[in-house]
């Protein structure tokens, strides 16, 4: 059993900052990519940022220069530092991880989502 637990969402004013965390736990042998996606009302889920186990990163154009993804591999945790937040960043943010469990099964896992609301 593998779980992803997200935290750090909330309400923030435009221009403010939030830091999201995603901790993976359970029957884990190794983690490949860890990333963040978001889904705004009436829109499809979209990639925000992803970081590979080797350190390569990819960002959506809309968040480049404002968001930073990082990982602590010892803690199986990914972070998303979000600065200069805009109302358009309002969405439910989901953590995703490509995990190999100890029985050598590999699959993609999702967190439950955390709401980020940017509003004055």
Image: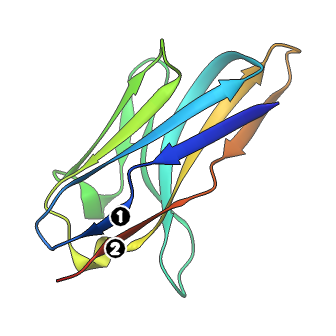
Give the x, y percent position of residue 37: 50, 56
Q: Position of residue 71 (x, y in %)?
A: 40, 26
Quadrant placement of the N terminus: top right
Q: Is residue 108 left or right of residue 97?
A: right
Circles 1, 2 touching at the beta carbon (< 8 Å): yes
Residue 80 pos. (x, y %): 34, 44
Q: Circle 2 sits in a helix, a strand or a loop, which is it?
A: strand
Task: Name which residue lies at 20% across and 73% down.
Answer: 86
Residue that label 2 marks: 117
Label 1: how many Cα within 10 Å (few below 14, some 14–19, many 20+): some
Instruction: From this view, report whether residue 8 is shown above or below residue 118.
Output: above
Write the residue at 28% across / 64% down: 62
Give the answer, above or below, for where 103 lies relative to 3: above
> On the rendered image, what quadrant is the C terminus found in?
bottom left
For label 2, the crowd category at 10 Å Cα-Cα, with few meaning under 14, some 14 to 19 and many 20 or more, is many
Instruction: Decide: is 54 above or below 107.
Output: above
Figure coloring? rainbow
Q: Secondary structure at mark 1?
A: strand
In the drawing, does residue 46 fall left or right of residue 3?
Answer: left
Question: At 49% across and 18% down in the image, what residue appears?
Answer: 75
Mark identifier at residue 10: 1
For marks 1 and 2 on the same chain, the one whose residue lies earlier in the sequence:
1
């Amino acid at each position: 059993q593998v779980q992803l637990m997200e935290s750090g969402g909330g309400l923030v004013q435009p221009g403010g900052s939030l830091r999201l965390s995603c901790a993976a736990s359970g029957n884990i042998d190794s983690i490949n990519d860890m990333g963040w996606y978001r889904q705004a009302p009436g829109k499809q889920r979209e990639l925000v940022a992803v970081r590979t186990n080797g350190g390569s990163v990819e960002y959506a154009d809309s968040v480049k220069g404002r968001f930073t993804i990082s990982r602590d591999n010892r803690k199986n945790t990914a972070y998303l530092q979000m600065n200069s937040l805009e109302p358009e960043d309002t969405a439910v943010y989901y953590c995703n991880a490509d995990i190999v469990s100890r029985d050598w099964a590999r699959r993609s896992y999702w967190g439950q989502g955390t709401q980020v609301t940017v509003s004055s």
